[in-house]
Protein backbone atom coordinates (compact mmCIF):
# COMPACT_ATOMS: atom_id res chain seq x y z
CA UNK A 1 0.00 0.00 0.00
CA UNK A 2 1.40 3.39 -1.03
CA UNK A 3 2.44 5.71 1.78
CA UNK A 4 0.31 8.83 1.85
CA UNK A 5 1.75 12.32 2.22
CA UNK A 6 0.72 15.73 3.49
CA UNK A 7 0.18 16.76 -0.14
CA UNK A 8 -2.18 13.83 -0.65
CA UNK A 9 -4.14 15.19 2.31
CA UNK A 10 -4.29 18.68 0.77
CA UNK A 11 -5.29 17.31 -2.63
CA UNK A 12 -7.95 14.88 -1.39
CA UNK A 13 -9.66 17.51 0.73
CA UNK A 14 -9.18 20.11 -2.02
CA UNK A 15 -7.82 22.71 0.36
CA UNK A 16 -7.41 26.07 -1.34
CA UNK A 17 -5.66 28.97 0.36
CA UNK A 18 -3.98 26.62 2.81
CA UNK A 19 -1.04 28.99 3.21
CA UNK A 20 -0.99 31.47 6.12
CA UNK A 21 -3.18 34.45 5.40
CA UNK A 22 -5.07 32.63 2.65
CA UNK A 23 -6.35 34.36 -0.46
CA UNK A 24 -6.70 37.66 1.42
CA UNK A 25 -2.92 37.79 1.84
CA UNK A 26 -2.40 36.83 -1.79
CA UNK A 27 -4.69 39.63 -2.95
CA UNK A 28 -2.83 42.15 -0.81
CA UNK A 29 0.72 41.33 -1.92
CA UNK A 30 -0.15 40.87 -5.60
CA UNK A 31 -2.01 44.20 -5.75
CA UNK A 32 1.30 46.02 -5.46
CA UNK A 33 2.76 44.35 -8.58
CA UNK A 34 0.71 46.28 -11.17
CA UNK A 35 -0.25 43.31 -13.30
CA UNK A 36 -1.83 43.94 -16.70
CA UNK A 37 -3.41 41.75 -19.40
CA UNK A 38 0.00 41.34 -21.04
CA UNK A 39 1.74 40.18 -17.83
CA UNK A 40 3.05 36.64 -18.02
CA UNK A 41 2.51 35.01 -14.61
CA UNK A 42 3.47 31.56 -13.32
CA UNK A 43 1.65 30.10 -10.31
CA UNK A 44 4.19 27.44 -9.36
CA UNK A 45 2.56 24.72 -7.27
CA UNK A 46 -0.94 25.99 -8.00
CA UNK A 47 -2.86 23.43 -5.94
CA UNK A 48 -6.60 23.69 -6.58
CA UNK A 49 -6.07 26.81 -8.69
CA UNK A 50 -7.59 29.38 -6.35
CA UNK A 51 -4.82 31.93 -6.81
CA UNK A 52 -4.40 31.35 -10.56
CA UNK A 53 -8.14 31.83 -11.13
CA UNK A 54 -8.10 35.03 -9.08
CA UNK A 55 -5.17 36.47 -11.07
CA UNK A 56 -6.75 35.65 -14.42
CA UNK A 57 -10.15 37.01 -13.40
CA UNK A 58 -8.95 40.15 -11.64
CA UNK A 59 -6.09 41.29 -13.88
CA UNK A 60 -6.74 39.46 -17.13
CA UNK A 61 -3.10 38.38 -16.93
CA UNK A 62 -1.64 35.54 -18.98
CA UNK A 63 -1.54 32.96 -16.20
CA UNK A 64 0.16 29.58 -16.28
CA UNK A 65 -0.63 27.21 -13.39
CA UNK A 66 1.63 24.26 -12.66
CA UNK A 67 1.36 21.45 -10.14
CA UNK A 68 2.76 17.96 -9.74
CA UNK A 69 -0.18 16.26 -8.04
CA UNK A 70 -2.74 14.74 -10.47
CA UNK A 71 -5.69 15.27 -8.14
CA UNK A 72 -4.78 18.92 -7.60
CA UNK A 73 -4.67 19.36 -11.37
CA UNK A 74 -8.11 17.79 -11.74
CA UNK A 75 -9.60 20.13 -9.18
CA UNK A 76 -7.83 23.17 -10.62
CA UNK A 77 -9.09 22.31 -14.10
CA UNK A 78 -12.65 22.01 -12.85
CA UNK A 79 -12.32 25.38 -11.10
CA UNK A 80 -11.08 27.14 -14.24
CA UNK A 81 -13.93 25.69 -16.26
CA UNK A 82 -16.51 26.53 -13.59
CA UNK A 83 -15.28 30.11 -13.21
CA UNK A 84 -14.81 30.64 -16.93
CA UNK A 85 -11.19 31.76 -16.71
CA UNK A 86 -8.42 31.15 -19.22
CA UNK A 87 -5.44 29.61 -17.47
CA UNK A 88 -2.83 27.32 -19.00
CA UNK A 89 -2.70 24.29 -16.70
CA UNK A 90 0.31 21.99 -16.75
CA UNK A 91 1.68 19.09 -14.75
CA UNK A 92 5.27 19.71 -13.82
CA UNK A 93 7.99 19.76 -11.20
CA UNK A 94 9.46 23.01 -9.84
CA UNK A 95 12.87 21.35 -9.86
CA UNK A 96 12.64 21.19 -13.67
CA UNK A 97 10.21 23.83 -14.86
CA UNK A 98 9.04 23.02 -18.40
CA UNK A 99 9.52 26.56 -19.72
CA UNK A 100 12.22 28.41 -21.67
CA UNK A 101 14.50 30.89 -19.94
CA UNK A 102 13.09 34.38 -19.37
CA UNK A 103 9.42 33.43 -19.84
CA UNK A 104 7.61 35.22 -17.00
CA UNK A 105 7.20 38.68 -15.51
CA UNK A 106 6.04 37.28 -12.16
CA UNK A 107 6.55 33.91 -10.50
CA UNK A 108 4.21 33.39 -7.56
CA UNK A 109 4.87 30.55 -5.12
CA UNK A 110 2.78 29.82 -2.04
CA UNK A 111 4.05 27.29 0.52
CA UNK A 112 5.79 25.13 -2.07
CA UNK A 113 9.53 25.76 -1.97
CA UNK A 114 9.84 24.54 1.63
CA UNK A 115 8.92 21.04 0.41
CA UNK A 116 11.58 21.01 -2.32
CA UNK A 117 15.32 21.00 -2.78
CA UNK A 118 15.27 24.69 -2.02
CA UNK A 119 18.25 25.97 -4.00
CA UNK A 120 17.26 23.96 -7.07
CA UNK A 121 13.71 25.35 -7.02
CA UNK A 122 14.90 28.93 -6.44
CA UNK A 123 17.31 28.55 -9.34
CA UNK A 124 14.47 27.45 -11.60
CA UNK A 125 12.33 30.41 -10.58
CA UNK A 126 15.21 32.72 -11.47
CA UNK A 127 15.82 30.97 -14.79
CA UNK A 128 12.25 31.37 -16.07
CA UNK A 129 11.89 34.99 -14.91
CA UNK A 130 12.60 37.78 -17.33
CA UNK A 131 15.38 40.19 -16.32
CA UNK A 132 13.77 42.52 -13.81
CA UNK A 133 10.98 40.01 -13.21
CA UNK A 134 9.64 39.47 -9.70
CA UNK A 135 9.47 36.41 -7.48
CA UNK A 136 6.87 36.41 -4.71
CA UNK A 137 7.44 33.38 -2.50
CA UNK A 138 5.41 32.78 0.66
CA UNK A 139 7.22 30.18 2.74
CA UNK A 140 7.41 28.55 6.13
CA UNK A 141 10.17 30.26 8.09
CA UNK A 142 11.77 29.33 11.39
CA UNK A 143 11.58 32.11 13.95
CA UNK A 144 14.89 30.80 15.31
CA UNK A 145 17.20 27.99 14.20
CA UNK A 146 15.48 24.67 14.87
CA UNK A 147 17.15 21.72 16.55
CA UNK A 148 17.69 18.40 14.81
CA UNK A 149 14.92 16.91 16.94
CA UNK A 150 12.48 19.67 15.95
CA UNK A 151 13.34 19.27 12.26
CA UNK A 152 12.84 15.51 12.50
CA UNK A 153 9.42 16.03 14.06
CA UNK A 154 8.36 18.40 11.29
CA UNK A 155 9.78 16.12 8.61
CA UNK A 156 7.73 13.20 9.90
CA UNK A 157 4.58 14.98 8.68
CA UNK A 158 5.76 17.40 5.98
CA UNK A 159 8.83 15.59 4.65
CA UNK A 160 10.72 18.88 4.81
CA UNK A 161 14.49 18.67 4.62
CA UNK A 162 15.08 21.98 6.38
CA UNK A 163 13.26 25.09 7.60
CA UNK A 164 15.39 28.18 7.04
CA UNK A 165 15.20 31.34 9.13
CA UNK A 166 14.42 34.66 7.46
CA UNK A 167 18.14 35.43 7.25
CA UNK A 168 18.82 32.05 5.69
CA UNK A 169 16.03 32.43 3.13
CA UNK A 170 17.37 35.84 2.16
CA UNK A 171 20.88 34.46 1.88
CA UNK A 172 19.73 31.67 -0.42
CA UNK A 173 17.93 34.15 -2.68
CA UNK A 174 21.03 36.32 -2.84
CA UNK A 175 23.17 33.28 -3.61
CA UNK A 176 20.94 32.37 -6.55
CA UNK A 177 21.40 35.85 -7.98
CA UNK A 178 18.26 37.71 -6.95
CA UNK A 179 18.46 41.34 -5.89
CA UNK A 180 16.24 43.90 -4.11
CA UNK A 181 15.16 41.18 -1.69
CA UNK A 182 12.59 42.18 0.89
CA UNK A 183 10.00 40.69 3.23
CA UNK A 184 6.64 42.22 2.36
CA UNK A 185 4.52 40.34 4.92
CA UNK A 186 5.10 37.88 7.72
CA UNK A 187 4.45 36.70 11.24
CA UNK A 188 4.28 33.61 13.39
CA UNK A 189 1.98 30.69 12.70
CA UNK A 190 -0.02 31.79 15.75
CA UNK A 191 -0.56 35.25 14.25
CA UNK A 192 -1.90 33.72 11.01
CA UNK A 193 -4.61 31.56 12.59
CA UNK A 194 -8.00 33.23 11.94
CA UNK A 195 -9.90 34.35 15.03
CA UNK A 196 -12.27 37.06 16.22
CA UNK A 197 -9.46 39.61 16.31
CA UNK A 198 -8.36 38.88 12.71
CA UNK A 199 -11.56 38.71 10.65
CA UNK A 200 -9.66 39.65 7.48
CA UNK A 201 -7.92 36.26 7.52
CA UNK A 202 -10.03 33.89 5.49
CA UNK A 203 -10.49 30.23 6.31
CA UNK A 204 -9.19 27.80 3.68
CA UNK A 205 -11.75 26.44 1.25
CA UNK A 206 -12.47 22.72 0.94
CA UNK A 207 -13.52 20.53 -1.99
CA UNK A 208 -13.27 17.03 -0.55
CA UNK A 209 -13.14 14.00 -2.82
CA UNK A 210 -15.83 11.35 -2.42
CA UNK A 211 -13.43 8.61 -1.40
CA UNK A 212 -11.18 9.57 1.51
CA UNK A 213 -8.55 7.16 2.74
CA UNK A 214 -8.92 7.01 6.56
CA UNK A 215 -5.15 7.39 6.90
CA UNK A 216 -5.47 10.97 5.69
CA UNK A 217 -7.32 11.88 8.88
CA UNK A 218 -4.22 10.82 10.81
CA UNK A 219 -2.13 13.21 8.69
CA UNK A 220 -4.67 15.97 9.32
CA UNK A 221 -4.55 15.33 13.07
CA UNK A 222 -0.73 15.32 13.08
CA UNK A 223 -0.68 18.56 11.08
CA UNK A 224 -3.03 20.27 13.53
CA UNK A 225 -0.95 19.07 16.48
CA UNK A 226 2.26 20.44 14.94
CA UNK A 227 0.57 23.73 14.06
CA UNK A 228 -0.33 24.20 17.71
CA UNK A 229 2.99 22.96 19.09
CA UNK A 230 5.14 25.10 16.76
CA UNK A 231 2.79 28.09 16.58
CA UNK A 232 5.44 30.46 17.92
CA UNK A 233 8.56 28.67 16.74
CA UNK A 234 7.45 28.68 13.11
CA UNK A 235 6.28 31.57 11.03
CA UNK A 236 5.75 32.61 7.46
CA UNK A 237 7.25 35.31 5.26
CA UNK A 238 6.41 36.63 1.82
CA UNK A 239 9.78 37.13 0.14
CA UNK A 240 9.91 39.52 -2.81
CA UNK A 241 12.99 39.28 -4.99
CA UNK A 242 13.94 40.67 -8.39
CA UNK A 243 15.86 38.82 -11.08
CA UNK A 244 18.96 40.76 -12.04
CA UNK A 245 18.79 42.53 -15.38
Image: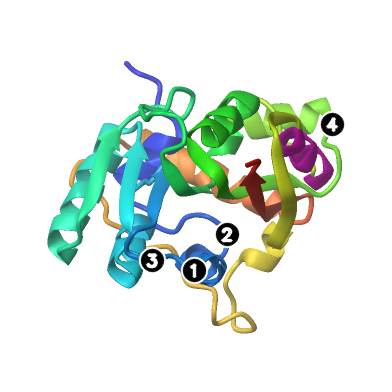
Q: Secondary structure at mark 3?
A: loop
Separation (CA) of disc 2 from disc 4: 23 Å
For disc 3, the marked residue is: 36
For disc 2, the marked residue is: 20
Separation (CA) of disc 4 from disc 1: 41 Å
Q: Position of residue 178 (x, y in %)?
A: 69, 40
Q: Residue at x 34, y 18 (%)?
A: 2
Q: Residues within 10 Å of mark 4 (few under 14, many from 20)?
A: few
Count of marks, rendered view: 4
Labels 2 & 4 near each other (Cβ < 8 A)? no
In the rendered view, tell whether residue 159 sits above or below residue 217.
Answer: above
Residue 49 in view (yes/no): no
Chain-order first, disc 4 or disc 1: 1
Q: Secondary structure at mark 2?
A: loop
> Mark 2 or 3, which is nearer the eye?
3
In the rendered view, tell whether residue 241 sits above or below residue 99.
Answer: below
Labels 3 & 1 near each other (Cβ < 8 A)? yes
Stretch in magenta: 166-174
Residue 147 is tagged as 4
Of the 4 image quadrants, the one containing the C terminus is: top right
Residue furthest out toward the front: 245
Amino acid sequence: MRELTYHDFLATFGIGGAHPGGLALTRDVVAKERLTPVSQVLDAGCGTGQTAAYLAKTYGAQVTALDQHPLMLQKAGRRFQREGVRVQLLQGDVHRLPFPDKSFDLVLVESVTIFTRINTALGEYARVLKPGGVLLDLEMTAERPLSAKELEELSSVYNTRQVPTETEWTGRLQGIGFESISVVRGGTVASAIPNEQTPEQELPEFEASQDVDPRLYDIWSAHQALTEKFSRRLGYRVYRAVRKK
